Amino acid sequence: MDYFDSYDRIVMMLIPPNNLRSETMEIEPFNQRTSNQPLLIKKHREKDELPLSNLNLNDREKELLRKSWNYSCNKKAAKVCRKACITTYKTVCDSHKCSSNMRKKFKRKCKSNCDDRFNSNKKNDDTDSE
């Protein structure tokens, strides 16, 4: 997918192969602890910052950073869903001679159902609203 490739490219620009994070671990020596105490491990992280102004990003890549790749995929999926739904209702209405009022209702329901399914933050995978 095009969005995933762009997202991977952005991630590689932000986190180059030489790892910006360095992690050190301190382990308490064995002779300083009793047998009843758990092993103590401390983690220290150092973060280097990468200035975003040096990145050459196009508009789509900036949108991916701003809204996350999931938003872009869901938006595209909702658009495909609407087109498929509209094509289907046109085919059905041509063969069954639907009224113009019914066509408008079909079109409205296609848009609202596809947007609800793909663009909402709710996770209603098993339930369908009517």
Image (spheres, grey):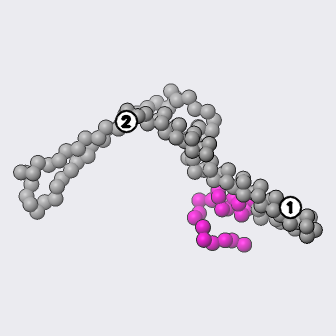
Q: Nearer the viewer, residue 86 or 45?
A: 86
In the image: residue 75, left or right of residue 40:
right
In the image: residue 89, left or right of residue 118:
right
Kindly identify which numbered label has been placed on residue 23. Answer: none
Q: Nearer the viewer, residue 93 or 46?
A: 93
The answer, for residue 101, to whether it is visible in the render is no
For disc 1, the marked residue is: 90
Q: Residue at x 86, y 66 (%)?
A: 92
Residue 11: image location, x then y, percent: 49, 39
Amino acid of disc 1: Lys
Quadrant position of residue 57: top right
Quadrant where the N terminus sits is top right
Q: Residue at x 66, y 51 (%)?
A: 75
For disc 2, the marked residue is: 19
Residue 10: image location, x then y, percent: 52, 37
Q: Residue furthest left?
A: 31
Eyeballing the image, is 83 above or below 17?
Answer: below
Q: Is residue 129 magenta?
A: yes
Residue 20: image location, x then y, percent: 37, 35
Amino acid of disc 2: Asn
Figure disc tally: 2
SS at badge 2:
loop
Quadrant where the C terminus sits is bottom right
| Magenta stretch bounds | 111-130
Q: Residue at x 16, y 55 (%)?
A: 39
Q: CA distance from mark 2 to mark 1?
A: 54 Å
Residue 68: image location, x then y, percent: 56, 47
